[in-house]
């Protein structure tokens, strides 16, 4: 069971009930009809990254759907929350990549997404044999240079400000796998 495709999606939901706000975030992301199974953080070799629109067309109601998900919730009025997913792939290599999830309070969408990409890049760097002080990361237009090894990154983030009336606000970001 190795996924052939993966897509990014994100969503936000608001409701007086915590669980319902999560369901609304799933609906906003387009993955509410699936039985989601959370998995860890490996992007398989030869897996193809596709658009959300292509991926959602491949989903069937009730199907077991594997994903890496970041989720955050608050019922505190005006509190900034975010959920982000980062992907790091070795350039020019058919090896596997890494997916990271990050959720935060008080971080902008841009900052959370960048941090999720950084996490994925550093996790991948360690699998390439680099540790601690050997990892020097220079961000260059979604590419990280790590001691002459190059890693391409992508990410997605959903941020939201807590509902002014104290309803639950939930954000999600997900990397969704398609197995054919």
Image: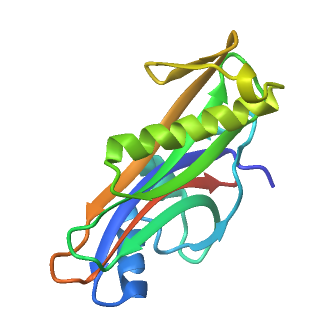
Residue extending furthest front? 133
Q: Residue at x 63, y 54 (%)?
A: 178
Q: Would residue 3 be visible to someone looking at this image?
A: yes
Q: Quadrant of the N terminus?
A: bottom right
Query: 37 or 2: nearer the eye?
Result: 37
Q: Residue at x 46, y 48 (%)?
A: 54
Q: Residue at x 42, y 46 (%)?
A: 112
Can you give x and y, in whole percent of width and height, for residue 18 in the image?
39, 85
Can you give x and y, in whole percent of width and height, for residue 41 in the image?
69, 50
Residue extending furthest left? 164
The answer to which image quadrant residue 14 occupies is bottom left
Query: Looking at the image, is 113 positioned above or below residue 126?
Result: below
Can you give x and y, in whole percent of width and height, for residue 50 in the image?
52, 40
Residue 161 vs residue 12: left or right? left
Query: 46 or 16: nearer the eye?
Result: 16
Query: 138 or 90: nearer the eye?
Result: 138
Q: Quadrant of the C terminus?
A: bottom right
The answer to which image quadrant residue 114 occupies is top left
Can you give x and y, in whole percent of width and height, for residue 82 in the image?
38, 57
Query: Looking at the image, is 157 positioned above or below residue 114?
Result: below
Residue extending furthest top? 148
Residue 37 vs residue 25: left or right? right
Residue 108 vs residue 83: left or right? left
Q: Residue at x 50, y 52 (%)?
A: 55
Query: 67 or 130: nearer the eye?
Result: 130
Number of numbered labels in the structure image: 0
Q: Would residue 51 be visible to someone looking at this image?
A: no
Picture colour scheme: rainbow
Residue extending furthest right? 129
Query: Looking at the image, is 45 positioned above or below residue 4?
Result: above
């Amino acid at each position: 069971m190795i996924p052939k495709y993966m897509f990014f999606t994100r969503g936000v939901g608001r409701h007086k009930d915590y669980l319902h706000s999560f369901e609304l975030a799933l609906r906003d992301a387009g993955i509410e009809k699936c039985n989601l199974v959370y998995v860890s953080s490996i992007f398989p070799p030869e897996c193809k990254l596709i658009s959300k629109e292509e991926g959602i067309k491949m989903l069937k109601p009730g199907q077991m759907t594997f994903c890496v998900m970041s989720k955050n919730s608050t019922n505190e009025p005006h509190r900034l929350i975010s959920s982000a997913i980062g992907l790091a792939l070795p350039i020019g290599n058919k090896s596997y990549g890494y997916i990271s999830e990050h959720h935060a309070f008080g971080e902008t969408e841009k900052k959370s997404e960048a941090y999720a990409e950084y996490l994925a890049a550093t996790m991948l760097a360690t699998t390439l044999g680099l540790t601690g002080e050997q990892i020097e990361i220079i961000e260059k237009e979604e590419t990280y240079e790590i001691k002459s090894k190059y890693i391409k990154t992508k990410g997605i983030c959903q941020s939201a400000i807590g509902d002014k009336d104290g309803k639950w606000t939930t954000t999600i970001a997900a990397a969704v796998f398609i197995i054919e």
